[in-house]
Image: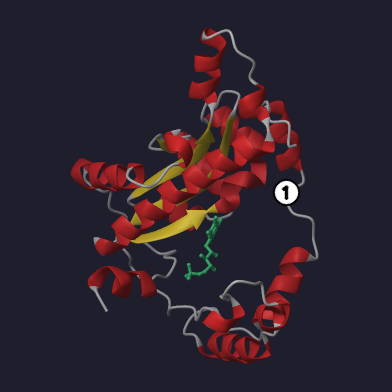
Amino acid sequence: MNTTIHNMEQHVSVRDFKDQALSSDTKQQLLRAAQSGSSSNFVQAFSIIEVSDKEIKNEIADITNSAAYVKKTGVFYVFVADLYRQSIMLQNAGKSLKGIENMEALTVATVDATIAGEDMAVAAESMDLGICYIGGVRNDVARIAELLNLPKYTFPVFGMTIGIPNHKNQVKPRMPLENQVSVNKYDVHKFADIEGYDKQIEEYYANRDSNAQAANWTSKNVNFFEEVRRPEVGEFLKRQGFALK
Ligand SMILES: Cc1cc2nc3c(=O)[nH]c(=O)nc-3n(C[C@H](O)[C@H](O)[C@H](O)COP(=O)(O)O)c2cc1C
């Protein structure tokens, strides 16, 4: 196994960092790595905002419910799905904005932002830094947009906190490949037959060295999805100019 794949398989989210800012050279390397990913039709429909202002960071930390590792970290970025540039180009060309308002365009921008995030994550972990995605920015997506001065046709998809790890959790076992990979056709039986995986995850949660608990993958998912989460995200996206259709 090569070093890249080895590092990827060692991934864990880090939620305990040394209180040490990353150097501007390190940040430049991370940002360049994030820019290097594929981009649908090369539209590069994302932006990255570093949050360094203490007041803004503290408010974002509170919004995300991840204060400890958003405040005490090396750097905190927000990844924004971004079609604002394209809206200006179209307006200047006297064209309709319908092409950036539909669900397909929002998907393109969200995927572009996500690819950038994961490329940055892989780069950071190759430098022995730790990362944690912070979807908690969508807990109050409108306030995040206000704090970061986000214009129409943008959407803060997630934050990412990156720093020197103080503590790392054990790697969480992923589901067996046969539950997630098939050839030619979706396998409705194998993909949903996760009894074996439930046992594995139950053991993982019972025996891990921090936050041990009695749970399996099914119970986690049922708890998560029995609630409609962040219903206001849809309304926010509409106000941002997206048609959601
Ligand atoms: C888009 C996204 C948003 C996430 N948001 C949060 C978050 O707000 N707070 C947090 O502590 N972890 C967050 N996570 C981390 C996940 O909980 C974590 O990746 C998952 O439990 C698997 O654990 P691992 O990354 O250690 O393998 C997020 C992950 C992703 C991909």
**Residue 149 drawn at (x, y percent):** 53, 25
Within the image, what quadrant is residue 214 found in? bottom right
Q: Looking at the picture, how far across and down is residue 134, in whole percent?
A: 52, 53
Indicate whether 114 appears above or below 242. below
The residue under label 1 is: 230
Q: Quadrant of residue 99?
A: top right
Residue 195 placement: quadrant: bottom right
Farthest-out residue, left = 25
The structure residue drawn at horizontal position 24% and vertical position 74%, both measured from the top left corner, is: 2
Q: Nearer the viewer, residue 3 or 75?
A: 3
Left or right for 224, reference 40: right
User: Quick check: 162 above or below 11?
Assistant: above
Residue 83: in sight, yes or no?
Answer: yes
In this rendered view, identify the residue nearer to me: 130 or 18. 130
- The residue positioned 61% from the left and 80% from the top of the image is 179
Figure check: 147 above or below 200: above
Residue 13: image x %, image y %?
Answer: 44, 66
Give the residue displayed 48% in from the left and 55% down from the top.
133
Estimate the x, y position of residue 55 in percent, counting from the top left: 47, 35
Q: Residue at x 44, y 50 (%)?
A: 115
SS at badge 1: loop
Q: Amino acid at mark 1?
A: Arg
Q: How is the image coloured?
A: secondary structure
* Residue furthest to the front: 184
Which residue occupies the foreground of this view, 32 or 193?
Answer: 193
Tell me: 12 left or right of 36. Answer: right
Q: Residues within 10 Å of mark 1 (few under 14, many from 20)?
A: few
Which quarter of the rendering shows the C terminus?
top right
Q: Is residue 196 left or right of residue 85?
A: right
Q: Does the closest atom of ligand 1 sit within 8 Å of the Cβ of label 1?
A: no
Q: Quadrant of the N terminus?
A: bottom left
**Which of 126 and 179 lies nearest the eye of the viewer?**
179
